[in-house]
């Protein structure tokens, strides 16, 4: 393990923000600590061998229940990382008003080294370990996808849970990010990327903030570079492109590509699928190192891969005016200091990438209510809209086109409601964090302001629970 401690860096950011709050040091200490850490080893038969698999689940806080947070499959998974990510989940949920406490899980494996059958065995065994220790359940702790996992793994988890808890009516709510056919919600897949877009769009719509950065108001025409074309990076880039931004750079493990005229995100995605590499995309310039993309000229830089990619060493060379942290922890505290002194706006991970957990919350609610969003009101709304439109047409003597008619009448589907709930959440959270920052000019950066908002909310929860009279 490297000397750098991710949890240490979260603690550092926490302490920096705690100075701007009035909580008792005991409450602050309780908020900061990880409440429960479960490290496990279990055997799985892989081919002719028995492999001992190392895995974790960390519940950072219990100020609300259930705990919530993704599960990562990667060789880099270690206790320090899982603790840090669990802590970030607590703060993230608090900022976006999602009533969960933070958790995170991980299995130290390279998922590419296993067949789907072997991965299924590992995932199911991990789930039964969590069940044995009461570390999973719709009212206890609800995992979700993270780096290296997706809908398929969540389907294995829910199936294992349901089969071991027969008759538990809310069992589907034991995990989120499931396929729609297994109790998932429409709109979860793109949620984190869309949340990143909504959050950054709100920042770009703030005239005072844009003026300070020397940028025009709005997303249209902004030059955007994205590092990582996984689920989060791909969707962030795609929503920016759809809103009229110019995607000038895209980066993956194998290198980066650049074009000042703009890259078509889907075309690049398909090119990578076909050739196995992002490089040599027609009309673009190649860069050998993925990290080169971080230092190119652009307005908004979105690191959407792993933690610690921008540090004290390369931060001075980053030219973007806004950094949108789509990944968890892509900047070290040293990088934060460089950007604060340069006047670069860092929009912090713990609220900017909260779109995933926000829509997970909607999925969990759907599972508990046992009804699809929109089912009860879609037709009712459409009938009302149709009647209203007919009245207006009759009074005005004018008729709208067939396309306009469809748009006006349309009652909400599940995905419409999920996206609208996400948009509301991200706009409100952005404003709340910005307002906190503006109210206290001593706060050095937006991350610290986000921590202050989070600490105040978690502190209030503890106070209201009466744990600290
Ligand atoms: N893994 C995602 C995150 O870090 C989603 C967590 C969730 O949906 O619970 O926010």
Image: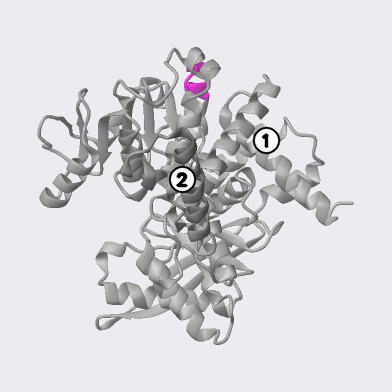
Quarter residue 448 falls in: top right
Q: Residue at x 37, y 61 (%)?
A: 150
Residue 256 in the image: x percent, y percent?
Answer: 22, 35
**Residue 345, can we see it?**
yes
Look at mark 1 in the image and give the residue it sits on: 452
Q: How many residues crowd around disc 1 within 10 Å: few (fewer than 14), some, or many (20 or more)?
A: many
Tell me the chief SS of the magenta region. helix
Quarter residue 9 falls in: top right
**Whole-number angstrom distance, CA of label 2 to CA of label 1:** 51 Å
Q: Residue at x 42, y 59 (%)?
A: 186
Mark 2 or mark 1, earlier in chain: 2
Residue 234 versus residue 72: which sits nearer the camera? 234
Residue 64 in the image: x percent, y percent?
Answer: 69, 58
Residue at disc 1, secondary structure? helix
Q: Residue at x 61, y 61 (%)?
A: 67
> Is residue 414 shown above or below 13?
below
Can you tell which of label 2 and label 1 is closer to the viewer?
A: 2
Q: How many residues crowd around disc 2 within 10 Å: few (fewer than 14), some, or many (20 or more)?
A: some
Magenta segment boundaries in residue numbering: 337-344
Mark 2 close to ligand 1, CB under 8 Å: no
- Mark identifier at residue 374: none
Query: Disc 2, disc 1: CB below 8 Å?
Result: no
**Residue 5, can we see it?**
no
> Is residue 304 shown above or below 37?
above
Is residue 339 one of those drawn in magenta?
A: yes
Residue 443 in the image: x percent, y percent?
Answer: 65, 24
Look at mark 2 in the image and give the residue it sits on: 390
Residue 341 in the image: x percent, y percent?
Answer: 52, 17
Mark 1 close to ligand 1, CB under 8 Å: no
């Amino acid at each position: 393990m490297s000397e750098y401690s991710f949890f240490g860096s979260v603690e550092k950011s926490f302490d920096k923000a705690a100075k701007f709050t009035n909580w008792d040091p005991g409450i602050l200490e309780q908020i900061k600590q990880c409440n429960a850490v479960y490290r496990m080893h279990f055997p799985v038969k892989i081919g002719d061998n028995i492999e001992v698999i190392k895995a974790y689940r960390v519940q950072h806080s219990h100020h609300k229940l259930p705990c919530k947070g993704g599960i990562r499959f990667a060789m880099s998974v270690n206790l320090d990382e899982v603790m840090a990510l669990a802590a970030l989940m607590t703060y993230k949920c608090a900022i976006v008003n999602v009533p969960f406490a933070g958790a995170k899980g991980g299995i130290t494996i390279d998922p590419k080294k296993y067949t789907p059958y072997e991965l299924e065995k590992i995932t199911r065994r991990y789930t039964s370990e969590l069940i044995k220790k009461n570390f999973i359940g719709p009212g206890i702790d609800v995992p979700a996808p993270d780096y290296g996992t997706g809908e398929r793994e969540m389907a294995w988890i829910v199936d294992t849970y349901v089969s071991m808890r027969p008759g538990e009516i809310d069992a589907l709510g034991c995990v989120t990010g499931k396929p729609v056919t297994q109790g998932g919600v429409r709109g979860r897949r793109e949620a984190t990327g869309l949340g990143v877009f909504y959050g950054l769009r709100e920042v770009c719509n703030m005239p005072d903030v844009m003026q300070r950065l020397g940028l025009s108001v709005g997303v249209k025409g902004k030059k955007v570079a994205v590092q990582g074309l996984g689920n989060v990076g791909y969707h962030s880039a795609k929503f920016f492109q759809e809103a009229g931004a110019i995607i000038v750079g895209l980066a993956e493990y194998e290198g980066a590509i650049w074009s000042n005229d703009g890259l078509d995100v889907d075309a690049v995605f398909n090119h990578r699928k076909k050739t196995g590499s992002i490089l040599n995309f027609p009309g673009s310039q190649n860069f050998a190192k993925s990290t080169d993309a971080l230092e190119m000229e652009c307005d908004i830089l979105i690191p959407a891969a792993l933690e610690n990619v921008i540090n004290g060493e390369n931060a001075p060379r980053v030219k973007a005016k806004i950094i949108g942290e789509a990944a968890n922890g892509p900047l070290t505290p040293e990088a934060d200091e460089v950007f604060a002194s340069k006047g670069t706006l860092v929009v912090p991970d713990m609220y900017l990438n909260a779109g995933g957990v926000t829509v997970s919350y909607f999925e969990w609610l759907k599972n508990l209510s046992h009804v699809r969003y929109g089912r009860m009101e879609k037709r009712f709304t459409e009938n009302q809209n149709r009647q209203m439109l007919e009245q207006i047409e009759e009074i005005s003597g004018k008729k709208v086109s067939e396309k306009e008619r469809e748009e006006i009448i349309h009652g909400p589907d599940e995905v419409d409601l999920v996206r609208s709930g996400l948009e509301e959440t991200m706009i409100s959270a952005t404003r709340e964090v910005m307002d906190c920052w503006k109210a206290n000019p001593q706060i050095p950066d937006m991350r610290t302001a986000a921590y202050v908002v989070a600490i105040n909310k978690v502190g209030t929860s503890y106070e209201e629970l009466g744990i600290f009279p």
